[in-house]
Amino acid sequence: MPWTRQHLLGLEELTKEEILEILDTAASFKEVSTRSIKKINALQGKVVVNLFFEASTRTSNSFALAAKRLSADTMSFSSSGSSVSKGETLIDTALNIQAMGVDAFVIRHSAPGAPHLLARHVNVPVINAGDGCHEHPTQGLLDMFTIREVFGRFEGLTVAILGDIRHSRVARSNAWGLRKLGARVILAGPPTLVPQAIGAALGVEVSHDIDAVIAEADVLNCLRIQFERKAANYFPGTREYAAIYGLNAERMKHCKKDAIIMHPGPINRGIELTPDLADGERSVILDQVQNGLAVRMAVLFLCMGAKPEKRTA
Ligand code: CP
């Protein structure tokens, strides 16, 4: 089925076939990064704008490099040092940048729905690079790409997403996508950070027994405690959190033989997982980062290449 979406705003609205089309396109782009000249001219002459209103290392650099690998020009915008600090609105900012003749916006914003609002006001593709606690679709996609690369399938797999689910856009995008692809998803962590209502809303399981979940999971995706969103108010202290809910070598003695450990980054080493596990043989954390580049190339390529007369939201 040919891709028709102009925007990538979340995985909730994508079909299984659309998710697989992105993963398959990403698989075809992964090889580009192994060439001596790491470039194809698919988006030559186009301009991709990175609008980052929140901090980022992986996502902002990955999108910038993905655009360059496709031969697009890039512009980077961050709120500090811009006229946002003088009170300019998101929409005015975007419309002024659009007037310079740009071809896509990649946006990260602390407000859930900011990319959706932007998409209603500009006439070029909008890619959500993380909107508050809502969705982080390209992180979800690169996680799925990495899981498929290791296991070759989704059906029959149990994916545990551990930690600060309450504040996590990564958990939401993973849950929507993995469910559609046929994986079993368990959200796990302290009851305060993993309320039953979130599992019910996403249609996935919830558990507060980390050891039971470790024993069942093929994939353990550890999420960061989001201290900047006041997550520390939801448990007594980081030492207790690490002891009761963190991944460590002792706990991992009871995992499945081929279980893998994922983390979207940035890691709070020693809290959600110990450094030996983050850097150990089960870890695919840097593979996730590598795969993120191919996934973002695919997303830019598909959204910017969708024929205007066939585009859907
Ligand atoms: N995983 C992720 O979104 O990382 P950054 O915040 O560094 O972009």
Image (tube, rainbow, N blue to C red):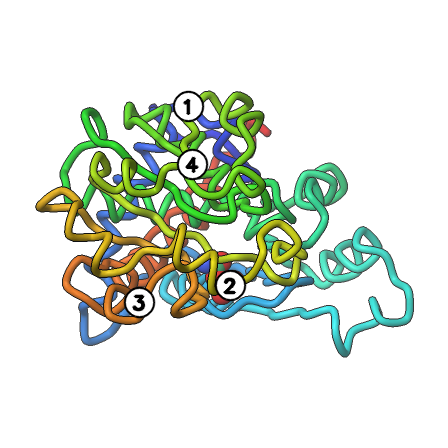
Q: Tell me: residue 78, above or below residue 191.
A: below
Q: Which residue is mark 4?
A: 208
Q: Earlier in the sequence, mark 1 or mark 2?
A: 1
Q: Tell me the quarter of the picture where residue 43 sits.
A: bottom left
Q: Name the residue tied to disc 2.
A: 238
| Contact, mark 3 vs mark 2 (Cβ under 8 Å) | no
Q: Nearer the viewer, mark 3 or mark 2?
A: 2
Q: Is residue 311 visible?
A: no
**Residue at mark 1 to residue at mark 3: CA–CA distance:** 30 Å
Amino acid type of the residue that numbered disc 2 sits on in the rendered structure: Thr
Residue at point 51% right, 32% down?
5
Q: Is residue 37 visible?
A: yes
Name the secondary structure under disc 3.
loop
Q: Residue 227, percent across and down?
A: 61, 61
Reading the image, the residue beneath label 3 is: 39
Q: How much space separates mark 3 and mark 2, taking CA atoms?
A: 44 Å
Comes first in the chain, label 4 or label 2: 4
* Earlier sequence position, callout 3 versus callout 4: 3
Front residue of 190/21: it is 190
Q: Amino acid at mark 4?
A: His
Looking at the image, is mark 1 or mark 3 earlier in the sequence?
A: 1
Q: Which one is closest to the eye, mark 1 or mark 3?
A: 1
The alpha-carbon separation of the residues under discs 1 and 2 comes to 39 Å
